[in-house]
Amino acid sequence: MERFVRVASTSEIQPGQGKVVEVDGRYVALFNAGGAYYAIDNTCLHRGGPLAEGLLEGKVVTCPWHGWSYDVTTGANTVNPNICVRTYPVKVEGTDLHVAV
Ligand code: FES
């Protein structure tokens, strides 16, 4: 059963931005893509770059280290969709953002 944990308020992540949050010992990158929130693993599958610090353009985030990019809605790498970071459900309650891992 999913257990949602409050991780941030909506004002902390403006549209086009990301933030790393910790949920049960996992580092999760939480993004605001045009007002919708998505959560994926923070760790890039290339060499572990911090995806929350990447550039978000639309629904695609580019890793700040060497440029791999992922669709934040699916976790799929945009060049090779067989490479996927994990995604997590996000719930918005008022101004609170919750993530389940
Ligand atoms: S660590 Fe992300 S592209 Fe290399």
Image: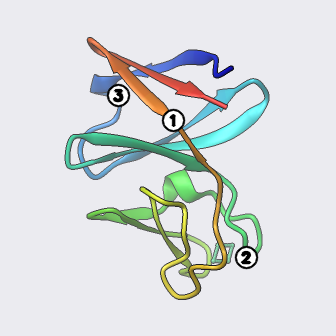
Q: Amino acid at mark 2?
A: His
| For marks 1 and 3 on the same chain, the one whose residue lies earlier in the sequence | 3
Classify mark 2: helix, strand or loop. loop
Q: Is residue 62 above or below residue 72?
A: below
Left or right relative to 79: residue 93 = left
- Pair 1/3: label in front: 1
In the image, is the residue at mark 1 within 8 Å of ligand 1 by its beta carbon?
no
In the image, what residue occupies the spot 69% across and 57% down? 43
Residue that label 3 marks: 12
- Which residue is at the front of the view, 21 or 64? 21
Residue that label 1 marks: 89
Q: Residue furthest top?
A: 94
- Which residue is at the front of the view, 84 or 25? 84
Instruction: Tell me how far mark 1 sits from mark 3, CA to CA.
Output: 18 Å
Residues at discs 2 and 3 in contact (Cβ within 8 Å): no
Residue 63's tag is: none
In the image, what residue occupies the spot 57% across and 58% down? 51
Left or right relative to 2: residue 16 = left
| For marks 2 and 3 on the same chain, the one whose residue lies earlier in the sequence | 3
| For marks 1 and 2 on the same chain, the one whose residue lies earlier in the sequence | 2
